[in-house]
Structure formats: structure tokens, C-alpha cells
Amino acid sequence: MFLGLLFLKYLAPIKVIFNKEIEQKKRLNLWFIRLRWIAIVISFMLIFIADFYLHYLQEESFWPLIFTVLFLLITNIFYKIFLTKKIFLKNLEKIQIFIDLLILSIMLQFSGGIENPLSFIYLLHVILTGILLSKIDCYKVVFFAIFFYATISIGELYKVFPHYTLLIYPHTTEKNIENADLETDINKHTDDENTLIHAAHYPLYVWSMIGLNFFLMLLIAYFITTIMERLRDEEKETQEKYQWLERVLQATGAGLLILNKDLKTEWMNQQIKNWLSLNSSSKQDRKESISNWIRGKDDEVEKTFKDGLTRTVEITRYTDLEQKQFFQVTIAPMFGDGGKIYQVAELVQNITEKKILEAEMLHSSKMATIGTMAAGIAHEVGNPLSSIATRLKLLEIQNDPVFLEKSIPLLQKEIERIKRIVRGISQFGKPTKEVWSICQINRIISETVEILKLHKAYKNCKIVTKLDIKLPQTLASYDQLKQVFLNLGLNAFEAMEDGGTLTLETFYEQGMIFINLIDTGKGISSQMIDKIFEPFFSTKEKGSGLGLFIVYHIIQAHGGTINAFSENEKGTKFSISIPIKQHIKNK
């Protein structure tokens, strides 16, 4: 098991990097092979045009050039075979460049030598090597190229190699020079090509061209390799940042998705693919899964493209096994040149376990609340039961039809009161389902006040409501907000042991609903006020420390805020703000 973990931690990433390098080498070699096919076709065309139509080449040059190009073609076939069978894969591109330099030198030898303007192709080899290979390899190519170029030039200068005339430039003869006839040019091949004057036979020209080409190759190699080193460093830095981001996302378990303006996926990490089951799906299913994911929040994404604001939404989806999952998606703009938004990033977190835990905590809190209110509930139920029992006893003693007629409505009223109390408590005690709907905050507060009146502390306290009758409706979780107001109300009762007043206010402005709960209790010290929303922190000896923690997270889930203001012996004020939303939450 330890070795398996060691492999996953160290060897597996190395294997992935090694495989990527192999794939990159294969693509590079394949590109070289395709480029060579183009060079072969162009070479054949130039040879035929220069020989049969323009008559630039000597007759003796044609077949050597054709055979050289055929040799290039054969080597290209072998390169393709080597690449397919992964033979010499590590150094295949270097072998290709070296052999290409040799073939180029042979072709130049049979087509004018250093007088051939196509000798600049040496420089192209240097440029390609500088772009695609390392700095050392580039300078190796420079020295090989200048070696071949110098060999041809010096060989022709000292008559070691024959010079094949290329009449792309006009030539003259020694006889014309002796007669001082510098205006008569030779524009066609003669029976004795040796009588023609060639620049390749002048030492000054030859050594100048060798020196010039060597200087140009070194200069180009320096600039190309310097630029490519910078680009490679930037690429390496970008790759390291990308890998770091991948590791961070993997460690946090978060998903990342990049969308363009057409709401098409530009990139996604592996976690997103796992959640959407893209690895094992068909192409059509993958496309449909991604479309469904984007469609669930396309309105929010389009808004972000328009105003550049970061948004957070919660969505639900069902797995293939019909298991419900909850996701929190943070939608953030990505700015390009000129501050324009060109893409949107979605940071996705699976909050399913968090939702389950919150539901369990909320239900436990409700049970604790019911336990706290048990005495008050018993009293509220006991009073109508006593009234019913007394009335039934009187009916048993007095056999009076008129009294019976008067008693029935009273009995029904008391029974209805008991049913209302029991119904309210039983509904409150049920496990909460996170159902979001358009709610009226005033109604939730009114129902909460009715439940608070069942508490035994209500005898010594007074509840005052100042509710804005024009308060707009908003999208919210009815049960969750009811729990918030109930928790805060019960805390207020506990803070007012000797009696007091609990005031509940509502009003709205600038797209926000504000709810204030103000008590006249003993207050909270300034040292504790900043900690009351932390989990397991309580100012009560037997408090769980979870009540206000749950309240805080419920309000936060509604996109709102809650703040507490208090002074010792002067009471406490809880101020809640919730944004007004009129659309059903994304699913």
C-alpha cells in the first residue's frame, strides 16, 4: 500500500510528464516530415522549371539533383517508419536536420554552389532549430551548416569540386575581360563552361561569403535562442502556475470551468468531469451534460458578462443513481486587454455534505427549542383542557338543554385551540426540506410571534411588532427564516429574565428588506459581541453555542447579512438585511 501511495505521489506525475514529452516529440517530428514533403515537391518543380524552361542549369546537373531529391524522399519515408515504430524517437529530429543540411549542400553543389541564392535555406535551418530545439542544438546546427557551406565554397575555389554554372545571373568570359568588353554577357550555357568567369573562383568573394554567412548564422542563432529562452521560461512559469492551480483545486476538491461569450466550454478541470460523469459517457451524452450544467445558471453568467460582477448561486442536480447533489457556484469575470470581459470562470464546490449537516443541525435546534418551550406548551394546552373538563363536569351535573347549547361552541373553541397548538408544534418539529419560494416576511414574523407566546417567559415580557404593510415579497426558505426569528426571539426572552419588551421591525429600501429584533435585556459585553456567531461559543452556561451560528449561515445563504449591537444592561439589537429576489432559485 505504501509503495502504491509512493507511486501515485511521485512516479505517476513523472510518468504523465514523460508521456507528454513523448507526444510533443512525436508532433514535432511529424511536423518536420510534413514540411519535408512540401520541400520535395517544391524542389522537383524548381529543378524542372530551371532546367527545361529557364535553362539555368547545366545539363550535367539535372540527374544528380533529381537523385538527391529522391534520396530526400526515401529518407522521409524512413523517418515516418521510425516515428511510427518509435525508433530513434529521442534524437530523430536532430538526425533529420543533420541529413537535411547534407542534402541541401549536395543540391547547392550541383546548382551553382555559393552563387545559388537558395543558400539562404541554411539560415532557415538555424531559425527552425532555434525555435524547436535547445540553444546548444541550435549552435551545433550553425557550425554544421557553416562547415558544409565552407566545404562547398573552398572546394570549388581550389578546384577540388567542379563548379556547375547557374545562369540565374549573367556571366562573362576571360576573353571578354582581355578585350575590355565588359558589356557582353553570357546568358546561355557554352560548350566549354570553364571559359566563364565565376565569383566562386575569387578568394575574396568566397571568404567574404563564408564569413558573412557565419556571422549571420551566429547572429540569428543568438537572437532566436534568446527570444525562445524567454518564451520557454514564461511557458514554464505559466505551466508551473497551472500545475499549482491544479494541485490547489485538487486539494480543495473544487471544480473550475471556463466559459466564453457564447457560453461554450473553453476548459474544465478533472473534478468537473467527475461530477458530470464525462469520463465514461459518450460524446453526445457529454455534450448534453455540459449543456444542462450551463443552462441551469445561464442568466447569471450572462449578467456577469454584462456588468462584470462576481455572483454566487446554488444549484442542485441528480446523479445517474438519482442522488441529489448541491453545488455552490461562484461566477467571476475574466478581463482581457482594455478591461473587456472575454471569459467567465466558474468555481464550483460540492456542498452536499454541508447541506445535510445544516439540515441536521437545524432539526436538532428545533428539538432543543421545543424542549425549552415544553413548560409553556403544557400550560397553553392545560388551560383549554381544564376548561373542557370543567364544562363537561357541569354538563354531567346540569341536565339543561339551554346550557348544553351554550357549551358546545365553547368546547369546540377550546378543542380548536388545542389542535392549533399541536399542529403548529408538530409542523415546526418536522425535518426541514430546503424549499425556496416567494415568501412574505411579515407573515413569517407573525407566525413566529404566535409560537413565542407559548413560551413561559412571555408572561413577564411584552412583544411589539412594527411591520411595514407595504413590505414586498422575496425569494426565501420559509422554514429557515422562521427558525432564525424564533432563535433570536427565544434568546431575547432569556436575556429578559425580569421582564422587558421585544420589538420586531420590518422595512425596505434600495432593494433590501431589513428586520430588526430589539430587546431590553441585560445585553452582551463588547468583548463577546464579536464572537457570538462563532460555532460552540455561548454566553449561557448550558448553551450549545450553535443557535446563532445556524442563524448566521441561514442569513448568509439568503445572500444577506446579520449584525449585533449591544451594551451591558441596555439590551441587544439584531439587524438583518436580505436582498429582494423575485425569481425561483436555480435548480
Image (cartoon, grey):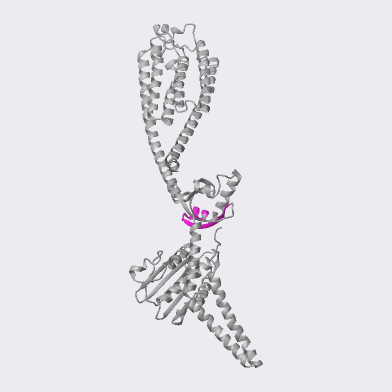
Q: Decide whether residue 304 is among the magenta residues.
A: yes
User: Can residue 146 be seen by looking at this rendering?
Assistant: yes
Q: Residue 262: image x %, image y %?
A: 54, 48
Which of 583 and 283 lies nearest the eye of the viewer?
283
Q: Is residue 354 left or right of residue 565?
A: right
Q: Is residue 166 above or below residue 399?
A: above
Q: Can residue 507 be seen here?
A: no
Rendering coords of residue 42 (x, y %) = 53, 23
**Which segment did they paint magenta?**
301-319
Q: Which residue is pictured at 50% across the width and 29% down the height? A: 31
Residue at 46 percent of width and 82 percent of height:
459
**Residue drawn 62% across and 93% down?**
398
Return the x and y of residue 404 as percentages of the image width and height.
Answer: 64, 90
In the rendered image, which quarter contains the N terminus? top left
Outermost residue toward the right in this view: 401
Q: Nearer the viewer, residue 483 or 361?
A: 361
